Amino acid sequence: MPDPKPELQKLLRGEYTLVAGLGEADRTRLLALIQEARRQQREALARAQEHALRFVPALLRKPLLKLFTE
Amino acid sequence: MSELLTRAELVKLSRVLGAKEDDVAFLAPLGVDGLRKLEDRISSTLFDEYRAAFQRLADASRLLPASLVAKMSELVFGPVISARVSGLMPPDRAIEIATKLKTKFLAEVTMQLDPRSASELLAIMPTRIVIDVAQLLMQRKEYVTMGRFVDDLTDEAIRAVTDSLQEDEALVHIAFFVERRERLNELVDLLRPERIRRIVAAVATGAPDVQAAGLAMMSQFTHKQLARFGEAAIALGPKILNALVAAAQREDATEVVASVIQGIGAEGRAVFSKMLADMDDAALDAWAQATTAANLWPAALKILAASTPDVQKEAAQALKRLGAPARAAIARALRAEKLESTLTAVEAALA
């Protein structure tokens, strides 16, 4: 199991000290929860993009794709 | 009491993470402030990851009629993305779109909305929409969402919502999740005395989770609101007071009930002594036992100390009827609080 500290430091930015007192197992669990929330958000955005591409006429698909991914 | 407040923060954090409350229970040692900061940080991290895309969608939506954007929000973007994007739109434009959304969808967007990024929007949200959404959220028991928006909604909107929601227990659950203590007190200030009596009764006679939420709510009150709740509790009589004391004992929060009853004014003190005088022996005994068990005699004696001599005499006559163990407990509290010289009538009655 990799040390969760570097990834948590990156995600929590200046607030890593908030969780520094937790044990490594708990910091690993917290990291997994944040990663799962990120995955859920990524999927929601991907679903919206997929629906949008189905919804708009072919002519507008390219500019629409840019809104999501540029 | 901090345990209950920590529980409220854990629920909010679980919402941000899209997780179950039990999944974040291990973070309880971070405490109320730590959990709030962590939730704030995670919320920003999630939002910032796709902020540029959300901003582009918000900008592009300006080119389309509000009714079309509303339709696309419902059919294409869904509540999560719509909530993120709405916080980045000019508030008046977001309101224009909100007025064209179905209430059911708007309620789902509200559940995903970060109050910090939508405070301007909430402050100008038409009251009619707020009431409609609140009623739907209420049906779904979405107390966390409702509590979090109290900070930013106008007093007018809050009063309209509290008047439209008849369930007193639900108001207690909502208050449990209000973020800012000052705002919670302002919210309580908007409630009429009759509603406060109903809420006190709901807390005293409610299920354990309602009692716990109610005590946590009261622990955040200023002196003014403690006094209003204390007077309501006393006016409701010994059964309600005893139920409140028993709940406080179970939740290890007797200091909250002590603060509530100590906060009462002159009128409440008179009602308190009348309540003592009117109790039959069984009711008086039950009340005395509850007060002794919860170590609330110091609070009760302080009320009497601030009362007129007539009130003190009336209360002393009532206390005289108690059995020896209860009288001994009161005498100990009288000495501990150094009130012998103020409450001479009570001291004489206990002898």
Image (cartoon, grey):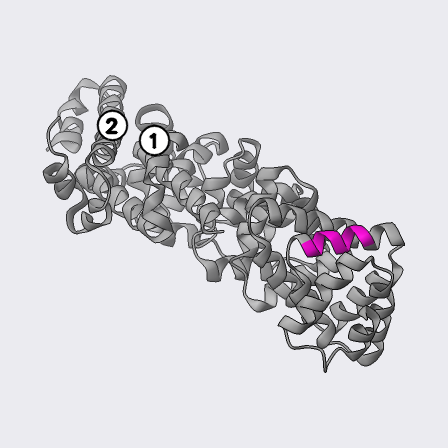
Tell me if mark 1 has few (under 14), some (14-19) or many (20+) residues whose alpha carbon lies within 10 angstroms of its own. Answer: some
Indicate which disc residue A62 carries.
Answer: none
Range of residues picked out in magenta: B285-292
Q: Image quadrant for the C terminus of chain A? A: top left
User: Is B138 in front, or is A6?
Assistant: A6
User: Is A61 in front, or is B327?
Assistant: B327
State the image quarter where residue B317 is shown.
bottom right
Query: Badge 1 sits on which subunit?
Result: B
Tell me if mark 2 has few (under 14), some (14-19) or many (20+) residues whose alpha carbon lies within 10 angstroms of its own. Answer: some
Kind of residue at badge 1: Gly
The residue identified by callout 1 is B18
Horizontal and vertical percent for residue B29? Answer: 34, 45
Where disc 1 sits, the SS reads loop
State the image quarter where residue B159 is shown.
bottom right
Point 56% across, 52% down: residue:
B253
The residue identified by callout 2 is A36
Going by the image, does B234 lie left or right of B24?
Answer: right
Kind of residue at badge 2: Glu
User: Whole-Å distance between the Cαs marked 1 and 2?
Assistant: 8 Å
Where disc 2 sits, the SS reads helix
